[in-house]
């Protein structure tokens, strides 16, 4: 039987009321790249920038540059073991990354995607979120998500009104909502995330679910191919610089890539 976390704010875990939030914490500034940095016992992150909770690709620009983003992926299977509570989220978004000329991450972020959690067993669902508001889980009874489902997510805005569309092509449903939101538009991204845990004792990094591999395809930013390059890549590392998840090189068309769990080279 599948199991998922109760969704009250972002994701509530048991009685500890720990909240999973999305925000990029990078170890270097946007626009810069890491040199060849071999982590102990793991693969090199190559030219990818490093984050404590994101792995994937982000394109960066100027204020209000990005007003739409989309992507397609197959929901990866959550590999759960020993009753551990873990989480991973697959999403597209605008904002939340370090903006050019800013010393800290952009505090605005609108995003939507699917989640693969372990909490007594694997659980899957779709959600959307606009920081700093609570995330919203989409009713899994009406909009079910399973491992292997093909998802397409798009975000687009007209002035301050955003349209969020989540489609499960395998299950045959489409969820659409609109919401007012004013974001920076500095960045567009396609991310596999280890959500952060926020509780009464402060913030801590949640444990990333072993998701194996997730492939992103048919990517657009502002309605066109983002033409990704290696300089847009983000590798997820822990506090000891061990690689937790890392992206492949962009596909030949510049609108696809994969993210792999662990430190092995991602193809």
Image (tube, rainbow, N blue to C red):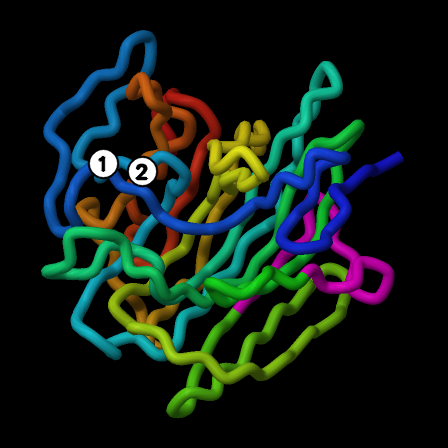
Residue 165 spot, x, y in % from top left: 59, 75
The quarter holding residue 27 reads top left
| Front one among 250 and 127 | 127
**Helix, strand or loop for the magenta stretch, by majority:** loop
Q: Which residue is mark 1?
A: 27
Secondary structure beneath disc 2?
strand
Q: Residue at x 75, y 70 (%)?
A: 173
- Mark 2–mark 1 contact, CB under 8 Å? yes
Q: Is residue 253 visible?
A: no
Q: Quadrant of the N terminus?
A: top right
Left or right of 236? Residue 176 is right
Q: Is residue 52 visible?
A: yes
Secondary structure beneath disc 1?
loop
Q: Residue at x 86, y 60 (%)?
A: 141
30 versus 129 height, above or below: above
Left or right of 75? Residue 223 is left
Residue 152 inside the magenta-drawn segment? yes
Q: Quadrant of the C terminus?
A: top left
Packing grade of label 2 (10 A; few <14, some 14-19, many >=20) is: many
Left or right of 253? Residue 22 is right
Residue 109 spot, x, y in % from top left: 41, 64
Range of residues picked out in magenta: 137-153
224 versus 229 height, above or below: below
Residue farthest right in this picture: 1
Q: Residue at x 69, y 24 (%)?
A: 80
Residue farthest top in this picture: 41
Q: Which residue is mark 2?
A: 51
Residue 243 spot, x, y in % from top left: 35, 23
């Amino acid at each position: 039987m599948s199991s998922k976390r109760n969704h009250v704010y972002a994701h509530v875990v048991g009685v500890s009321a720990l909240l999973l939030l999305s925000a990029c914490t990078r170890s270097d500034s946007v626009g810069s790249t890491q040199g060849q940095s071999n982590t102990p016992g793991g693969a090199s992150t190559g030219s990818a920038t490093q984050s404590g909770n994101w792995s994937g690709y982000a394109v960066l620009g100027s204020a209000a540059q990005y007003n739409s983003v989309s992507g397609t992926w197959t929901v990866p299977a959550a590999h759960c073991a020993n009753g551990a509570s873990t989480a991973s989220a697959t999403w597209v978004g605008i904002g939340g990354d370090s903006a050019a000329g800013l010393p800290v991450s952009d505090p605005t972020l609108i995003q939507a995607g699917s989640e693969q959690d372990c909490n007594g067993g694997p659980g899957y669902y779709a959600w959307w979120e606009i920081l700093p508001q609570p995330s919203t889980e989409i009713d899994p009874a009406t909009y079910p998500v399973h491992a292997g489902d093909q998802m397409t997510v798009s975000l687009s805005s007209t002035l301050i009104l955003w349209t969020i569309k989540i489609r499960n092509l395998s299950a045959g449903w489409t969820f659409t909502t609109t919401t007012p939101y004013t974001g920076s538009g500095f960045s567009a991204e396609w991310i596999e995330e280890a959500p952060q845990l926020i509780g009464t004792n402060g913030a801590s990094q949640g444990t990333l679910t072993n998701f194996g591999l997730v492939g992103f395809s048919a990517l657009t930013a502002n309605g066109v191919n983002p033409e990704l390059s290696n300089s847009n890549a983000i590798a997820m590392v822990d506090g000891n610089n061990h690689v937790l998840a890392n992206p492949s090189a962009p596909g030949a068309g510049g609108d696809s890539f994969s993210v792999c769990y662990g430190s092995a080279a991602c193809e």
